[in-house]
Image (tube, helix red, strand yellow):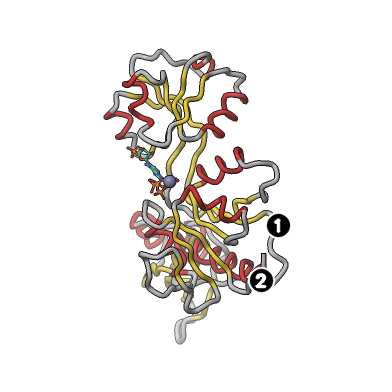
Amino acid sequence: MKPRDRLRIAMQKSGRLTEPALELLKRCGLTFRQSRDKLFCFGEGEPVDLLLVRDDDIPGLIAQGVCELGIVGRNVLDEFRLTAGRESEPLAELRPLGFGRCRLSIAVPQEFDYSGPAQLAARRIATSYPGLLGAWLREHGVEAGVVTLAGSVEIAPKLGTADAICDLVQSGGTLVANQLREVDVLLESEAVLAGPQNMPADERGDLIALLLKRLDGVIQVRESRLLLLQTPRAALDAVTRLLPGGPQPTLLPVAGQPDQLMLQALCAGEVSWRQLEEIKKAGAREMFVLPVEKMLA
Ligand code: PRT
Ligand code: ZN
Protein backbone atom coordinates (compact mmCIF):
# COMPACT_ATOMS: atom_id res chain seq x y z
CA MET A 1 0.00 0.00 0.00
CA LYS A 2 1.21 3.52 -0.84
CA PRO A 3 2.35 5.36 2.29
CA ARG A 4 0.08 8.18 3.40
CA ASP A 5 1.13 11.39 5.08
CA ARG A 6 -2.27 11.87 6.77
CA LEU A 7 -3.37 9.81 9.74
CA ARG A 8 -6.71 7.99 9.84
CA ILE A 9 -8.69 7.25 12.96
CA ALA A 10 -11.66 4.88 12.83
CA MET A 11 -14.56 5.30 15.22
CA GLN A 12 -18.14 4.16 15.60
CA LYS A 13 -20.48 5.84 13.11
CA SER A 14 -23.54 5.74 15.29
CA GLY A 15 -23.82 4.19 18.73
CA ARG A 16 -22.84 4.49 22.36
CA LEU A 17 -19.24 5.50 21.67
CA THR A 18 -19.88 8.09 18.94
CA GLU A 19 -20.54 11.27 20.95
CA PRO A 20 -17.89 10.75 23.67
CA ALA A 21 -15.29 9.77 21.05
CA LEU A 22 -15.94 12.91 18.97
CA GLU A 23 -15.82 15.05 22.12
CA LEU A 24 -12.49 13.50 23.12
CA LEU A 25 -10.96 14.10 19.68
CA LYS A 26 -12.21 17.68 19.76
CA ARG A 27 -10.48 18.19 23.09
CA CYS A 28 -7.29 16.88 21.48
CA GLY A 29 -7.60 19.68 18.92
CA LEU A 30 -9.01 17.52 16.13
CA THR A 31 -12.00 18.89 14.25
CA PHE A 32 -13.52 17.55 11.08
CA ARG A 33 -15.40 18.95 8.15
CA GLN A 34 -19.08 18.18 8.80
CA SER A 35 -20.15 15.06 6.93
CA ARG A 36 -21.42 12.82 9.69
CA ASP A 37 -23.57 10.87 7.23
CA LYS A 38 -20.47 9.86 5.26
CA LEU A 39 -17.85 7.21 5.86
CA PHE A 40 -14.95 9.68 5.61
CA CYS A 41 -14.49 13.02 7.42
CA PHE A 42 -11.65 15.30 6.41
CA GLY A 43 -9.63 16.70 9.33
CA GLU A 44 -9.35 20.48 9.37
CA GLY A 45 -6.65 21.54 11.83
CA GLU A 46 -4.28 18.59 11.78
CA PRO A 47 -3.59 16.08 9.00
CA VAL A 48 -5.84 13.54 10.71
CA ASP A 49 -8.98 12.17 9.05
CA LEU A 50 -11.85 10.16 10.46
CA LEU A 51 -13.47 6.93 9.27
CA LEU A 52 -17.00 6.38 10.57
CA VAL A 53 -17.77 2.66 10.62
CA ARG A 54 -19.44 -0.11 12.61
CA ASP A 55 -17.49 -0.73 15.79
CA ASP A 56 -16.95 -4.40 14.92
CA ASP A 57 -15.01 -3.40 11.78
CA ILE A 58 -12.51 -1.14 13.58
CA PRO A 59 -9.83 -3.68 14.64
CA GLY A 60 -9.83 -5.25 11.16
CA LEU A 61 -9.39 -1.85 9.49
CA ILE A 62 -6.33 -1.15 11.67
CA ALA A 63 -4.93 -4.64 11.06
CA GLN A 64 -5.30 -4.11 7.30
CA GLY A 65 -3.59 -0.73 7.47
CA VAL A 66 -6.67 1.13 6.20
CA CYS A 67 -6.36 3.32 9.29
CA GLU A 68 -3.71 3.71 12.00
CA LEU A 69 -5.86 4.21 15.10
CA GLY A 70 -9.33 3.32 16.31
CA ILE A 71 -11.62 4.11 19.22
CA VAL A 72 -13.38 0.91 20.19
CA GLY A 73 -14.58 -1.09 23.19
CA ARG A 74 -11.91 -3.28 24.81
CA ASN A 75 -14.43 -6.13 24.38
CA VAL A 76 -14.34 -5.74 20.58
CA LEU A 77 -10.55 -5.26 20.43
CA ASP A 78 -9.77 -8.29 22.63
CA GLU A 79 -12.26 -10.47 20.77
CA PHE A 80 -10.53 -9.57 17.50
CA ARG A 81 -7.08 -10.28 18.95
CA LEU A 82 -8.24 -13.73 20.06
CA THR A 83 -9.98 -14.67 16.82
CA ALA A 84 -7.86 -12.98 14.10
CA GLY A 85 -5.55 -15.22 12.12
CA ARG A 86 -1.85 -15.41 12.95
CA GLU A 87 -1.01 -13.57 9.73
CA SER A 88 -3.02 -10.54 10.94
CA GLU A 89 -1.04 -7.45 12.03
CA PRO A 90 -0.86 -7.54 15.89
CA LEU A 91 -2.87 -4.78 17.60
CA ALA A 92 -2.26 -2.96 20.85
CA GLU A 93 -4.43 -1.16 23.37
CA LEU A 94 -2.66 2.22 23.45
CA ARG A 95 -4.80 4.02 26.06
CA PRO A 96 -7.94 3.34 28.10
CA LEU A 97 -10.32 6.26 27.50
CA GLY A 98 -12.63 6.20 30.52
CA PHE A 99 -16.04 6.06 28.80
CA GLY A 100 -18.29 3.28 27.46
CA ARG A 101 -17.68 1.27 30.61
CA CYS A 102 -19.36 -2.14 30.84
CA ARG A 103 -18.38 -5.71 31.63
CA LEU A 104 -18.57 -9.00 29.78
CA SER A 105 -20.29 -11.40 32.14
CA ILE A 106 -21.78 -14.84 32.47
CA ALA A 107 -25.48 -14.73 33.34
CA VAL A 108 -27.76 -17.63 34.14
CA PRO A 109 -31.53 -18.07 34.63
CA GLN A 110 -32.67 -17.24 38.19
CA GLU A 111 -33.22 -20.89 39.07
CA PHE A 112 -29.75 -22.02 37.82
CA ASP A 113 -27.72 -23.12 40.85
CA TYR A 114 -24.33 -21.49 40.10
CA SER A 115 -21.32 -21.83 42.37
CA GLY A 116 -18.51 -21.40 39.83
CA PRO A 117 -17.36 -21.96 36.23
CA ALA A 118 -17.32 -25.76 36.71
CA GLN A 119 -21.11 -25.59 36.81
CA LEU A 120 -21.09 -24.67 33.12
CA ALA A 121 -19.51 -27.98 32.02
CA ALA A 122 -21.42 -29.55 29.12
CA ARG A 123 -23.89 -26.63 29.09
CA ARG A 124 -24.61 -24.41 26.08
CA ILE A 125 -23.61 -20.76 26.46
CA ALA A 126 -24.89 -18.15 23.99
CA THR A 127 -22.59 -15.23 23.18
CA SER A 128 -21.38 -12.74 20.56
CA TYR A 129 -17.88 -13.13 22.03
CA PRO A 130 -16.82 -16.74 21.27
CA GLY A 131 -13.12 -15.84 21.46
CA LEU A 132 -13.24 -14.27 24.92
CA LEU A 133 -15.65 -16.89 26.23
CA GLY A 134 -13.56 -19.76 24.80
CA ALA A 135 -10.39 -18.37 26.42
CA TRP A 136 -12.13 -17.99 29.79
CA LEU A 137 -13.55 -21.55 29.65
CA ARG A 138 -10.11 -22.96 28.78
CA GLU A 139 -8.54 -20.98 31.61
CA HIS A 140 -10.98 -22.64 34.02
CA GLY A 141 -10.64 -26.07 32.40
CA VAL A 142 -14.34 -26.16 31.54
CA GLU A 143 -15.71 -27.81 28.40
CA ALA A 144 -18.97 -26.23 27.34
CA GLY A 145 -20.87 -25.64 24.10
CA VAL A 146 -20.46 -22.12 22.73
CA VAL A 147 -23.48 -20.90 20.73
CA THR A 148 -22.42 -17.86 18.71
CA LEU A 149 -25.19 -15.31 18.11
CA ALA A 150 -24.89 -11.90 16.45
CA GLY A 151 -27.38 -10.24 18.79
CA SER A 152 -30.31 -10.68 21.22
CA VAL A 153 -28.20 -13.07 23.24
CA GLU A 154 -30.27 -12.44 26.38
CA ILE A 155 -33.34 -14.25 25.05
CA ALA A 156 -31.46 -17.47 24.18
CA PRO A 157 -32.21 -19.22 27.53
CA LYS A 158 -35.92 -18.43 27.21
CA LEU A 159 -35.93 -19.77 23.65
CA GLY A 160 -34.23 -22.94 24.86
CA THR A 161 -31.20 -22.45 22.59
CA ALA A 162 -28.79 -22.00 25.52
CA ASP A 163 -28.53 -22.67 29.27
CA ALA A 164 -26.52 -19.52 30.04
CA ILE A 165 -25.27 -16.42 28.28
CA CYS A 166 -22.05 -14.42 28.09
CA ASP A 167 -22.90 -10.81 27.23
CA LEU A 168 -22.16 -7.18 27.99
CA VAL A 169 -23.75 -5.77 31.13
CA GLN A 170 -23.89 -2.17 32.21
CA SER A 171 -26.77 -1.35 34.57
CA GLY A 172 -27.97 -4.96 34.72
CA GLY A 173 -31.47 -3.90 33.60
CA THR A 174 -31.49 -6.12 30.53
CA LEU A 175 -30.61 -9.18 32.60
CA VAL A 176 -33.35 -8.46 35.15
CA ALA A 177 -35.89 -7.95 32.36
CA ASN A 178 -35.01 -11.42 31.07
CA GLN A 179 -34.99 -13.15 34.46
CA LEU A 180 -31.23 -13.67 34.30
CA ARG A 181 -28.63 -13.12 37.00
CA GLU A 182 -24.98 -12.10 36.57
CA VAL A 183 -22.67 -14.68 38.15
CA ASP A 184 -19.14 -14.15 36.81
CA VAL A 185 -17.23 -11.31 35.12
CA LEU A 186 -14.85 -12.20 32.24
CA LEU A 187 -13.73 -8.71 31.29
CA GLU A 188 -14.04 -5.13 32.56
CA SER A 189 -14.42 -3.04 29.44
CA GLU A 190 -14.32 0.61 28.38
CA ALA A 191 -13.55 2.46 25.18
CA VAL A 192 -9.85 2.30 24.30
CA LEU A 193 -7.54 3.77 21.70
CA ALA A 194 -6.37 0.85 19.58
CA GLY A 195 -3.43 0.88 17.18
CA PRO A 196 -0.84 -1.34 15.56
CA GLN A 197 1.78 -2.89 17.82
CA ASN A 198 4.44 -1.71 15.36
CA MET A 199 4.05 2.03 14.77
CA PRO A 200 4.55 3.35 11.23
CA ALA A 201 8.13 4.64 10.85
CA ASP A 202 7.10 7.70 8.78
CA GLU A 203 5.36 11.01 9.64
CA ARG A 204 2.32 9.10 10.81
CA GLY A 205 4.36 7.65 13.69
CA ASP A 206 5.27 11.19 14.77
CA LEU A 207 1.61 12.26 14.50
CA ILE A 208 0.54 9.30 16.66
CA ALA A 209 3.15 10.24 19.30
CA LEU A 210 1.86 13.84 19.27
CA LEU A 211 -1.75 12.70 19.60
CA LEU A 212 -0.92 10.34 22.47
CA LYS A 213 0.73 13.22 24.32
CA ARG A 214 -2.32 15.42 23.85
CA LEU A 215 -4.60 12.57 24.84
CA ASP A 216 -2.67 11.99 28.07
CA GLY A 217 -3.07 15.68 28.85
CA VAL A 218 -6.80 15.60 28.11
CA ILE A 219 -7.38 12.49 30.22
CA GLN A 220 -5.36 13.88 33.12
CA VAL A 221 -7.09 17.25 32.90
CA ARG A 222 -10.56 15.70 32.80
CA GLU A 223 -10.15 14.67 36.44
CA SER A 224 -7.85 17.46 37.64
CA ARG A 225 -8.75 20.56 39.66
CA LEU A 226 -6.57 23.52 40.52
CA LEU A 227 -6.92 24.54 44.15
CA LEU A 228 -5.96 28.11 45.12
CA LEU A 229 -6.00 29.37 48.69
CA GLN A 230 -4.39 31.75 51.15
CA THR A 231 -2.97 30.49 54.39
CA PRO A 232 -1.01 31.96 57.32
CA ARG A 233 2.57 30.61 57.30
CA ALA A 234 1.91 29.17 60.77
CA ALA A 235 -0.93 26.98 59.41
CA LEU A 236 0.93 25.82 56.29
CA ASP A 237 1.80 22.33 57.58
CA ALA A 238 -1.74 21.65 58.79
CA VAL A 239 -3.24 22.89 55.50
CA THR A 240 -0.77 20.96 53.32
CA ARG A 241 -1.54 17.73 55.18
CA LEU A 242 -5.21 18.04 54.21
CA LEU A 243 -4.65 18.65 50.49
CA PRO A 244 -6.07 15.97 48.16
CA GLY A 245 -3.46 13.89 46.30
CA GLY A 246 -1.35 15.48 43.59
CA PRO A 247 2.11 16.94 42.99
CA GLN A 248 3.76 19.25 45.54
CA PRO A 249 1.92 22.58 45.87
CA THR A 250 3.46 25.88 44.75
CA LEU A 251 3.82 28.65 47.36
CA LEU A 252 3.81 32.36 46.53
CA PRO A 253 4.28 35.40 48.77
CA VAL A 254 1.31 37.74 49.33
CA ALA A 255 2.22 41.42 48.78
CA GLY A 256 2.20 43.44 52.00
CA GLN A 257 1.37 40.41 54.22
CA PRO A 258 4.63 38.65 55.11
CA ASP A 259 2.89 36.13 57.41
CA GLN A 260 0.55 34.99 54.62
CA LEU A 261 1.18 32.63 51.68
CA MET A 262 -0.73 31.92 48.52
CA LEU A 263 -0.87 28.17 47.81
CA GLN A 264 -1.55 26.58 44.44
CA ALA A 265 -2.10 22.82 44.20
CA LEU A 266 -3.02 20.55 41.31
CA CYS A 267 -5.40 17.88 42.65
CA ALA A 268 -5.79 14.54 40.90
CA GLY A 269 -9.57 14.38 41.41
CA GLU A 270 -12.64 16.26 42.62
CA VAL A 271 -12.29 18.48 45.68
CA SER A 272 -15.41 18.10 47.83
CA TRP A 273 -17.14 20.70 50.04
CA ARG A 274 -16.25 18.54 53.02
CA GLN A 275 -12.53 18.67 52.13
CA LEU A 276 -12.69 22.46 51.60
CA GLU A 277 -14.37 22.95 54.98
CA GLU A 278 -11.65 20.89 56.69
CA ILE A 279 -8.88 22.88 54.99
CA LYS A 280 -10.59 26.11 56.00
CA LYS A 281 -10.79 24.92 59.60
CA ALA A 282 -7.02 24.40 59.50
CA GLY A 283 -6.59 28.11 58.76
CA ALA A 284 -6.93 28.61 55.00
CA ARG A 285 -9.18 31.23 53.40
CA GLU A 286 -9.96 32.73 49.95
CA MET A 287 -10.26 29.24 48.50
CA PHE A 288 -10.97 28.56 44.82
CA VAL A 289 -11.38 25.24 43.00
CA LEU A 290 -10.89 25.64 39.25
CA PRO A 291 -11.33 23.16 36.41
CA VAL A 292 -8.20 22.67 34.29
CA GLU A 293 -8.63 23.40 30.60
CA LYS A 294 -5.37 22.12 29.08
CA MET A 295 -2.21 20.51 30.42
CA LEU A 296 1.08 19.74 28.68
CA ALA A 297 3.74 18.08 30.77
O1 PRT B 1 -23.67 -0.48 14.82
P1 PRT B 1 -22.51 -0.91 15.66
O2 PRT B 1 -22.09 -2.33 15.41
O3 PRT B 1 -21.38 0.07 15.54
O4 PRT B 1 -23.02 -0.77 17.18
P2 PRT B 1 -23.28 -1.86 18.31
O5 PRT B 1 -24.74 -2.00 18.47
O6 PRT B 1 -22.47 -3.10 18.10
O7 PRT B 1 -22.61 -1.14 19.54
P3 PRT B 1 -23.20 -0.28 20.76
O8 PRT B 1 -23.30 1.16 20.34
O9 PRT B 1 -24.38 -0.91 21.37
O10 PRT B 1 -21.98 -0.46 21.77
C1 PRT B 1 -20.69 -0.04 21.45
C2 PRT B 1 -19.78 -0.38 22.61
O11 PRT B 1 -20.28 0.28 23.79
C3 PRT B 1 -19.70 -1.83 23.03
O12 PRT B 1 -18.81 -2.58 22.22
C4 PRT B 1 -19.20 -1.72 24.46
O13 PRT B 1 -17.79 -1.59 24.48
C5 PRT B 1 -19.82 -0.42 24.95
N1 PRT B 1 -20.99 -0.61 25.85
C6 PRT B 1 -21.12 0.00 27.07
C7 PRT B 1 -22.07 -1.37 25.66
C8 PRT B 1 -22.89 -1.24 26.80
N2 PRT B 1 -22.28 -0.38 27.64
C9 PRT B 1 -24.15 -1.96 26.86
N3 PRT B 1 -24.86 -1.83 27.86
N4 PRT B 1 -22.46 -2.16 24.64
C10 PRT B 1 -23.63 -2.81 24.69
N5 PRT B 1 -24.49 -2.76 25.77
C11 PRT B 1 -25.74 -3.56 25.65
C12 PRT B 1 -25.54 -5.04 26.03
O14 PRT B 1 -25.14 -5.79 24.91
C13 PRT B 1 -26.91 -5.47 26.53
O15 PRT B 1 -27.76 -5.80 25.45
O16 PRT B 1 -26.74 -3.09 26.51
C14 PRT B 1 -27.41 -4.19 27.14
C15 PRT B 1 -27.08 -4.24 28.60
O17 PRT B 1 -27.22 -3.00 29.21
P4 PRT B 1 -27.81 -2.88 30.69
O18 PRT B 1 -27.61 -1.45 31.07
O19 PRT B 1 -29.26 -3.26 30.60
O20 PRT B 1 -27.03 -3.81 31.56
ZN1 ZN C 1 -21.24 -3.61 16.75
Q: Would you say 146 lies left or right of 282 here? A: right
* 10 Å crowding of disc 1: few (<14), some (14-19), many (20+): few
Residue 143 image point, x, y percent: 57, 17
| Residue lying at 39% horizontally and 20% vertically, measured from the top left | 161
Inter-mark Cα distance, 1 to 2: 13 Å
Residue position marked by numbered label 2 in the rendering:
206
Q: Quadrant of the C terminus?
A: bottom right
**Quarter assignment of residue 288:** bottom left
| Position of residue 167 measured from the top left corner of the image (x, y, whole percent) | 43, 33
41 versus 272 height, above or below: below
Q: Residues within 10 Å of mark 2 (few under 14, many from 20)?
A: few
At horizontal 66% and vertical 71% (from top left) the residue drawn is 206
SS assignment at label 2: helix
Looking at the image, is mark 1 or mark 2 earlier in the sequence?
A: 1
Q: Residue furthest left?
A: 177
Q: Residue at x 53, y 57 (%)?
A: 70
Residue at mark 2: C-beta within 8 A of ligand 1 = no
Task: Quarter of the image for the N terminus: give it.
Answer: bottom right
